Amino acid sequence: MVCPSLTRSFSLIFSIYKLRKREQVRVFFVYIEDKEERTMRYLPNAAQMKEADNYTIETLRVPSVELMERAAMSCVAAMVERKLDLSDILIVCGSGNNGGDGFAIGRILSGMGYQVTVYMAGNWDHCSKDCEYQARLLEKTGGLLCNEYPEGEYSIIVDAIFGVGLKRQVAGTYAEVIGRMNASDAFKAAVDLPSGISADTGCVLGTAFRADLTVTFQAEKCGLALYPGKEYAGEVAVADIGISLEPFAARQDVAYTYNKEEYSKLLPKRLQDSHKGTFGRLLVIAGSKGMSGAAYLNARAAYQAGAGLVQIYTAEANRVILQTLLPEAIVTAYQKFDKEELLRLLAWADVVCIGSGIGAGKKSAKILKTVLKHTEVPCVVDADGINLLASHPQYMEYLLKKDCILTPHMKEMSRLTGVETDKIKESRIEFLKDYTKKYGLTCILKDSRTVISSDGKRACINLSGNSAMAKAGSGDVLAGLTAGLLAQGLSCSDAAVLGVYLHGKSGDYAREKKGSYSVSATDLTEYLGDVLKEQEEMRDEKLYENLRQN
């Protein structure tokens, strides 16, 4: 099936061969893509995906029922390719177009000779036009269609109750049905999105279907990337069914992520004709008495990221420890607040990283105020620096129109803004975009899925990293790593996006080597070199390929 009207050429060849004696099925999908590379993967919310659907149907004149057929075939193909047990199938449908997908899946599987039971959990009186059409087609194939939940054991249960447009809490009969589905030992597959998960936020709307596999269409929805939606979705397979994503190109409110090859394009250049000053002078203001580790992790991560010179400004009690642990760093120590000395250090620096482990006392507040008021270079504010901003909100005015990156986790963001963490999670993308626009800065909002937002740019959702990184000092590594990239000339936006990805990948490497329990913040700095080497090789390979082609 070919639709030449699509802006992105799409060709789908679907062939099913069934040998009745051996019950073998082979499915082939062939996609013909444009040569132009897509540099980002869109992660749309429900309204944005609806816009793309409407554009494809109304402007490009692709019939909605045709998209539904492709969606259904993609789901069948995904199940067959994974060699799932399709001996006894239950499909639970709603009355909207997601239910229509379910009825079409049932018809295809029934036509292939499988035993299919379809339960209509929705209201027949409220069926969408396409859903009603697909239900009639299913009846003609002889598939079993029920109006009561069919008891029994099934090899696979397919959830097609709600689509991406669900906004309300799931309750009543729907909640009871989802509970029954979850209680089954069958393999569980969701169509486009597990029912009960918000496509916008990943939040559970009362209750939700727990899938082993989710086949989503054209683009991974934002709610499938964010937790807990990510957990409920299981394996996520993205099927290209010919929905044009062209409307997203002009919208800066559509979130995105990169494939790992794309991150390599953000790496700062390492010129052959260079010296240590070429790669930046970073001033790290970190650590108080008993908190030398924060300063060490900042500085070590910055050096590992490629920064040329790192000077640590810290409490006198940390001098010997830091000079021993990190002899390549310059250590300047203080016992009391010395404004003139601090101004001298600021004049030396190309980038400042402040806040990790500095404490929340009066001396620390004076240091932060001086830095924010007088620095003219990019600045990363982390940890205690953010808590001090929360305690002294008047300091925020010094950040206006400056190149600044804030690195709060959820609780720090709550202190900074006075908004409860649950409220932030309910609309983190929009919340973060509004916040960064207000102050004209970049913010790394750390969580199980970290979101990066810069004024005037799309929000980026980072997909690297894991729970093994939930250890003291992990944030200090991220702050130093990001500042080290800034020191080499990256913009705040690029340094934040690349820094978070590299940080997460270092954690992935560390977990692979040490397991989920024993990873420490120091391990993140150890494996950062391996991650950067991999990225460098990807970049060089791509450059060579481009040169060869040209």
Image (tube, rainbow, N blue to C red):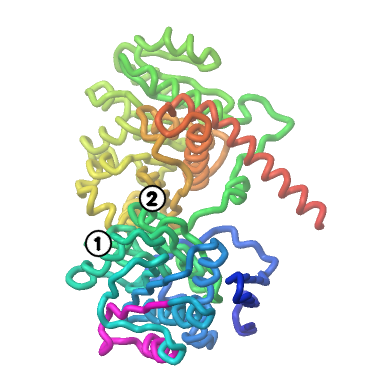
Q: Is residue 217 above or below residue 410?
A: below
Marks 2/1 in contact by CB < 8 Å: the verdict is no
Q: What x and y, as percent, mark residue 71?
A: 49, 76
Q: Is residue 281 visible?
A: no
Q: What x and y, as percent, mark residue 208?
A: 29, 62
Dot 1 surroundings within 10 Å: few (below 14), some, or many (20 or more)? some
Q: Is residue 488 above or below residue 462?
A: above
Horizontal placement of 392 versus 288: left or right?
Answer: left
Which residue is at a point 39% across and 39% down the rendered structure image?
467
Residue 28 located within the stretch drawn in magenta: no
Between disc 2 and disc 1, the foreground one is: 1
Foreground: 458 or 446?
446
Quarter occupied by the C terminus: bottom right
Q: Which amino acid, by three-letter code, is at mark 2?
A: Gly
The earlier-in-sequence mark between 2 and 1 is 1
Dot 2 surroundings within 10 Å: few (below 14), some, or many (20 or more)? some
Which residue is at a point 64% across and 39% down the rendered structure image?
534
Q: Which residue is mark 2?
A: 440
Which residue is at a point 58% across and 36% down the rendered structure image?
531
Q: What x and y, as percent, mark residue 7?
A: 61, 77
Q: What x and y, as percent, mark residue 326?
A: 50, 15
Q: Residue furthest left?
A: 172
Q: Is residue 239 above or below residue 326?
A: below
Foreground: 170 or 445?
170
Q: Which residue is mark 1?
A: 207
Picture quadrant of residue 444: top left
Q: Which residues are magenta?
A: 116-137
Picture quadrant of residue 314: top left
Q: Is residue 118 above or below residue 323?
A: below
Q: Which amino acid, by three-letter code, is at mark 1?
A: Thr
Which residue is at a point 51% across and 64% down the rendered structure image?
238
